[in-house]
Each structure stands twice: as C-alpha cells, then as structure tokens.
Image (cartoon, grey):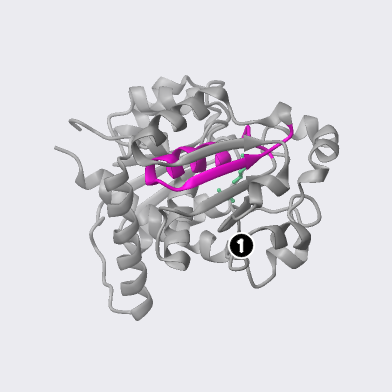
Amino acid sequence: MKNKKDFLSITDLSPKAIWEIILMAKNLKSKFNQGDAIQESLKNKSLIMIFEKPSLRTRLSFEMGMVKLGGHAVYLGPSDIGIGIRESVSDIAKVTSSMGEIIVARTFKHQTVEELAKSSKVPVINGLSDLEHPCQALADFMTIWEVKGKLEELKIAFIGDGENNIAHSLCLGTAMLGASFSCASPSQYWMKAEIVSKAKEIALNTGALITETVNAQVAVENADIVYTDTWVSMGDEIEKEERLKTFNPYQVNKQLMKEAKKNAIFMHDLPACRGNEVTTDVIDGLQSVVFQQAENRMWAQMALTLYLLKNVC
Ligand code: CP
Ligand code: NVA
C-alpha cells in the first residue's frame, strides 16, 4: 500500500482532518440512528486488533464499527501472539499486514506501536499506548462539539494523572483545535515535557492556552469541561498504593465541579473507579457525558477507518 497513513498520535492528523472525521462520524451516527444506513463501504476489508492490554470500549467499538460498515474484525489478545516474546514486533507487523487492510494496536510501550507501523504495509492505529490514546481524544472532541456546539474558546480542565496517555492526547488535540487546556496534577505527575513543548509550539499558531498547576481549583476555574482518568493506568498497578495516596486531593467531586462554569460538563474515558478519581454523584450526575463519549468511540473510529483507507494512493 503506497503512502499509507498511520494514526499513532493525535498530531498525525491535521486540524482540518480532525474536523472532517468528526463531521463524518456525526453523519454516520445520524444515519444509523435513523435506521436508513445500509453500509457496505468496508466490504471485504479486515481490521486486525493486536492488544497487549485488556479493553472493553476500544475493542468493542472497532469490532462493531467494522460490522456496521460491512467489514470484518479479528482480535488477537495478549495470550494469542506474545508480542516480542513469541515473535518479533516486525514479524508480527509483516504477517498481519499481509492479510488485513488495517491494524489497531494497544501496547504498553509507545515504541511498540511505532515499530509495528514501521514494518506494516497497511495503516496502523494506536488503540492506546503509554504515551497517547488518540482514538479516545477524537471521540472526546466529537462529544464536546455535540454538547457545546464548538471547540475553540472552550477551557478543558484535566485533573489527576497528567503523565498519562489521555492527558497527552487531549493536550495536543486541544492545542491543534484552538481551545485551552489546564492540567492539575501533583508535581511528580505532570505531563511529559516533550508533549507540553510540542503542544505549546502548536498553540503559537492556534491561540490555544496550555497551562499546568498543582492546584485543582485553579485548573477548573472557568472551565467548560472537567475531565479525569484513572489514577492507576494499565501498567502502573505496582504503584497503586502510593498513587491512591498522592492523588487523593485531586478527586473530582461536587465541590470541585462547583468551581467550574455552571454549565460545565464532566468527562471520563472509562473505566472509572468511583470513589477515587471521581465521586458517584458526579459521574452518574446530570453534568456527566461519559456514556455519550463511550458511544462516540464507535462513530469516530468508523470515520477514522474510512478516512485512513480512503487516503491511500
Ligand atoms: N476508554 C477506553 O479506551 O476503554 P477500554 O480500555 O475499555 O478500551
Ligand atoms: N490511562 C488509562 C486509560 C484507559 C482507557 C490507562 O492507560 O489504563
């Protein structure tokens, strides 16, 4: 496949392409929900999922998306192929890309998804690595746009673990789309410096504002969106006890939500640990859009898959 395009970071798309995908996703969502969509656009196409970690949303949304578009999906879980143990990453990429049209990989190290992309003949999508979760960010921007009607001029406050795939993709994407991103984390868990400097460089052209603080109240002041993620990401389990203590002051609760704008929404990529990063009354309350976010994973990824397969010379 000549000029194949991968999606390893949210910055692999231009802002124009992000908007194109969001609009295509919304169109697919409306058509399917009205019941007048018979889609065969991905007939005879296969998506291969190579996952080193568990998943509900990412796996299900890619599989269901392929079914809706007339294609097929194959899941290869951690015990199926033993990435880098039973076989090298590059051999796995060569074999899978000789049989399928597109690959989604969920890996511990970001380097693994990069290596897969390097040896793959077909587009590779990052379905979460330790550095980024760009598919989640696409669905999140779609959700914010559905609820708020715009993205620019909005303030997103991310509270909790800044050195985290979700925070990184949101920060970069926000910079690209011209909104503001304020991240409140304990000082040892701030976003990776390389991500912040890349986001700030992008922001020079879009007018976005990227800030970091240790103070959750400061981050949520005037925020349109309050976002959090688990305090213990996959791969961080060994640090669980210490993390629960360190992040304790960063819980999103009713009190913190009151510091944001009155019409602020609450977002979480899920899975959530109620009572840790967010209280039950917030995540299950009226301001929460978490299940809209989860559903939008499917529509956004259907559009992404169509975009990546169409953009091949
Ligand atoms: N948000 C998300 O990626 O969920 P899963 O880990 O269940 O795929
Ligand atoms: N930061 C979380 C996201 C899960 C979707 C993790 O990496 O486990």
Q: Say if 26 sits above or below 53 in the image.
A: below
Q: Vertical placement of 209 versus 197: above or below?
A: below
State the residue at coordinates (44%, 53%). 153
Indicate which quadrant contains ligand 2: top right
Q: Nearer the viewer, residue 52 or 288?
A: 288
Residue 134 in sight: yes
Residue at position x 43%, y 50% from top?
138
Residue drawn at 27 percent across, 35 percent down: 5
For residue 109, which quarter of the picture? top right
Q: Is residue 126 magenta?
A: no
Judging by the rendered image, the residue that carries numbered circle 1 is 261
Classed neighbour count for the residue bearing mark 1: other residues with Cα under 10 Å, few (<14), some (14–19), many (≥20): some
**Residue 136: percent from the left, percent from the top?**
49, 48
Residue 154 in the image: x percent, y percent?
Answer: 48, 54
Instruction: Name the image quarter holding the N terminus.
Output: top left
- Bounds of the magenta segment: 161-186
Residue 92 lies in what quarter of the image? top left
Q: Is residue 76 above or below residue 276?
A: above
